[in-house]
Image: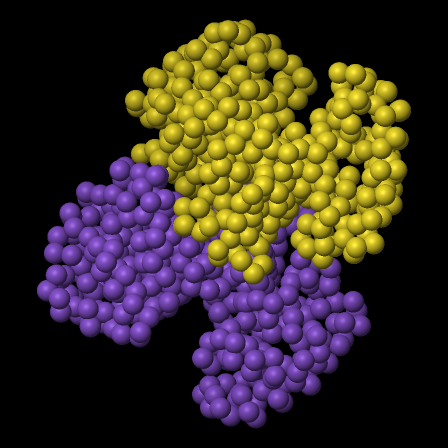
Chain colours: A yellow, B purple
Amino acid sequence: MKNIPLLLIGCGGVGRQLLQHIVSCRSIHAKQKVHLRVVGICDSKTLLVPSDVFTMELDDAFLIEVCQAKLKGSSLLTLSNSGQHKVFLNSEIMGKIVDIAALLSRSTGLTVIDCSASSDTTGVLTRVVDLGCCVVMANKKPLSSAMEDYEKLLAYPRRIRHESTVGAGLPIISSLNRMLSSGDLVHRIVGSLSGTLGFVMSEVEDGKPFSQVVRSAKNLGYTEPDPRDDLSGMDVARKALILARLLGRHIVLDSIKVESLYPEEMGPSTMSLASFLENGLPLLDKGIQERVEKASSNGNVLRYVCLIDDLRCEVGIQELPKSSPLGRLRGSDNVLEISSRCYNQQPLVIQGAGAGNDTTAAGVLADIFDVQDLFH
Amino acid sequence: MKNIPLLLIGCGGVGRQLLQHIVSCRSIHAKQKVHLRVVGICDSKTLLVPSDVFTMELDDAFLIEVCQAKLKGSSLLTLSNSGQHKVFLNSEIMGKIVDIAALLSRSTGLTVIDCSASSDTTGVLTRVVDLGCCVVMANKKPLSSAMEDYEKLLAYPRRIRHESTVGAGLPIISSLNRMLSSGDLVHRIVGSLSGTLGFVMSEVEDGKPFSQVVRSAKNLGYTEPDPRDDLSGMDVARKALILARLLGRHIVLDSIKVESLYPEEMGPSTMSLASFLENGLPLLDKGIQERVEKASSNGNVLRYVCLIDDLRCEVGIQELPKSSPLGRLRGSDNVLEISSRCYNQQPLVIQGAGAGNDTTAAGVLADIFDVQDLFH
C-alpha cells in the first residue's frame, strides 16, 4: 500500500469538498493500493497538523468535522483546542508547511494542495516543489502571476498538476499535456471557460435584456457576490494565460487583450455594487442588444471566449457560427475546441460542467491520484 | 535524465507512425528529462534487439529505416542481416520478449507496446506485467478476450495504459480513469466510436442509399478491406466491452447485444466480398431508408452507437435527438457522452477524430510518457 501524505491549503468550498471526496473514496483508493494520509490542513489563519507527521494523520472523523465547521463558515481555529493537534497561527503557517515538506520529501514525499484563491501561496509552493514534493492546484493565482514564478513552479513539470484551474474538473489540462507530450502541434484554442458568461451570452441571444440576465445569474448563485468580478473577464483571462503558458508562451496577464463587459466608469472603485446593479447595468442593455442582432443577421451568435492562436491570446466577445460547438453552447457548460496537427479538419472538443465545488474537487483528487505514480 | 526502455510489438501503420513520433519528439522529451530508448521491435515474424539491451538501443537512423521498410510493406526480416542486431524468428519471439522484460524489470523497468491487432500477444503481456514492467496498448484484442486475461493484465492497473484502444488518441480512457479515481459515479456512456459507421449514418441521413454510401466509404479508405468487418459492429463491441470493463463490469464480448448492419446470410462465410458489394448491399437500402425516414418523422436521426448504463451494454442503431451531441455528429468524428454524478444535467462530451495512424500513435506515445512517472 502506497502511503501518500497530503497537506491542504484552503478549505473553503473546493477544499472542503475535496476532504469529503478523500474520505468517501477510501475503498476505491484501497483497491488501487493507495492511502491518502492528510498531514495538514490550513485556512488563512490556522494550520492544524498531527503530533507526528511521519506516522500520524488527521483522521476521517476529524476531516468530516472540518467539513461541517467550514460549511457553517467557522474558522479552523474553532477546532484547534482539542489538544489533539499541533496548531500554528497566521505568520507561522507558511514556514511550517515548508518545514513539513523538508521533513517528508526525504522519506515519503508530500503533495501540497492549493485550494485557496490567494496569490500569497506562490512562495511556499515553489519552495515545496524545490524540496522534491508535488503540488496540485485549483488556485489560478500562482500560475498566472509573474513569469519567473511560473517557471519556478514548473521547473519539474511532472510534479505540478492543476486540472481544476481551467474548466473545473473537465479534462482540459490533462488532455493538452497528453497532446504536447506526444508531439502534437496545437495551432488554436478557442473556448468558453466561464459558466457565468456562457449563461449570460446564451440568454441575451434569446432576446432577454443584459441587465435582467445578469441579475438573474446573480440570484441563481452563478456569479461572484459582485458580478463585475465575472463581467470584467479577468477570471477568463487568467485561464487563458494558464493555457497559453502551457503551450509555451512566455506572456503575462497584462499582455492579454481583455474585453470587459462594463465600462471603466462603472468599476468597483467608482460605483457601488447596488448602484451598478440598479443604475449601471441597464445602460449596457442597448449596446449588447445591437451586437446580438448584428451577429444574428450574419447567422452568428455572440460568445465570450478565450482565443489563443499563433498570433493572439485574447479574451472577449466573438461572433461565431451558430452551428459550431461554441455557437451551440447553451447554459453554463464550458466548451473548449483545440485545433492541432492531429485534430486539423475538426477540432478536439471537450464540453461539460465547468464550475461547481463537486466537479472542481473531483479534478483536484484525480490530479492527486495521478501524481502518486511519482512516489514509490 | 530518465532512460525508459521500450519494446514495440507490431510495426504496421500505428507502430510505424509511433516510431516516427518517438524520433521527432526527442527534443520535447529531452526538455522533460526523458529519453525513450527502443530496445526491441518485432512484427509477426522477426524480433530485432541491440546486442546489449542494458546499455544499447536501436538508433534513430535505424528506426527511420524500419519506418521506410514497413511503409513499403517489407518485413523486418529484410533489415535483419546487417549484423548489427540480434535477430529472433517466429516461435522464439514471445519467449525472448519475456527474457528481456525479466532482465530489465530488475534494473530500469521496461514498457512493452502492443500496436499489433493480434490476440496472440495476451500471454506475453500478462507475463511482462507480472515481471513489474508496463504495457501500453493500441491493440484491443487482449483487453476484450476472456475476463481472466483482463484481470491478469489489470492486476497492477497503473502499469497498463490503453488510450488508443477506444477513439484513437481522443482522451477517453484517461478521462474516464480520472473520473473513476476521483470517485465520480458514471451512470451512462453513449458514443459513436466508429468513424466508418459515423460517416455511413450521417450520409444515409442525407438521403443517399446505404449501398452507395458504403461503397464510397470503402473507396475513400474509411473501411476495412472487407467493409463487413465494420458493418458487423464487432469492432465497436470490443470498444464497448473495454469501456464497460473499465467501469467495473465483469462481462465478455458474447454478452454484448450487437446489431450487425448486414444479415447472417450475407456474411463472409457464405458470400464473397465482390458479391456482397454488388448484389448483397443494395438489398439493404430499403430497410435502412425506412428507418431513417421513421426517425426523421420523429425529429430524430439514426446513429450507430455503443450504450452502457446500469442495465445495458449494447451496440447498434439508436434513434437520437437531432440536437444532441451525437445527433449533430457529421462525418467521421467520434463522440462520447458520459453522464455521472459530476456531469448530471449535461454530459461530459469528448469529440474529435477517432481514427488515423497519426492520432492513434500520438495516443500511444502520450501513454508511454505518462507511465514513465512509475520509473525512477
Q: Residue at x 83, y 39 (%)?
A: A288
Horizontal and vertical percent for residue A333? 68, 44
Residue B192 vertical position relative to residue B159 in the rendered view, above or below: below
Q: Residue at x 73, y 37 (%)?
A: A197
The one of A291 and A157 positioned closer to us in this rendering: A291
Please identify the quadrant where the N terminus of chain A is shown. top left
B77 left or right of B243 in image: left
Residue B13 vertical placement versus A208 (above, below)? below
Q: Position of residue A196 (x, y in %)?
A: 72, 36
> B200 or A204, which lies in front?
A204
Does residue A165 appear left or right of residue B156 in this picture? right
Which residue: 21% across, 56% down?
A: B58
Residue B337 placement, left or right of B72: right
Image mark count:
0
Residue B338 spot, x, y in % from top left: 60, 52
Q: Quadrant of residue B116?
A: bottom left
Q: Is residue B182 visible?
A: no
Question: Which residue shows up at 75% across the image and 16% down it?
Answer: A269
Quarter of the figure that contains the C terminus of chain A: top left
Q: Is residue A108 above or below residue A181?
A: above
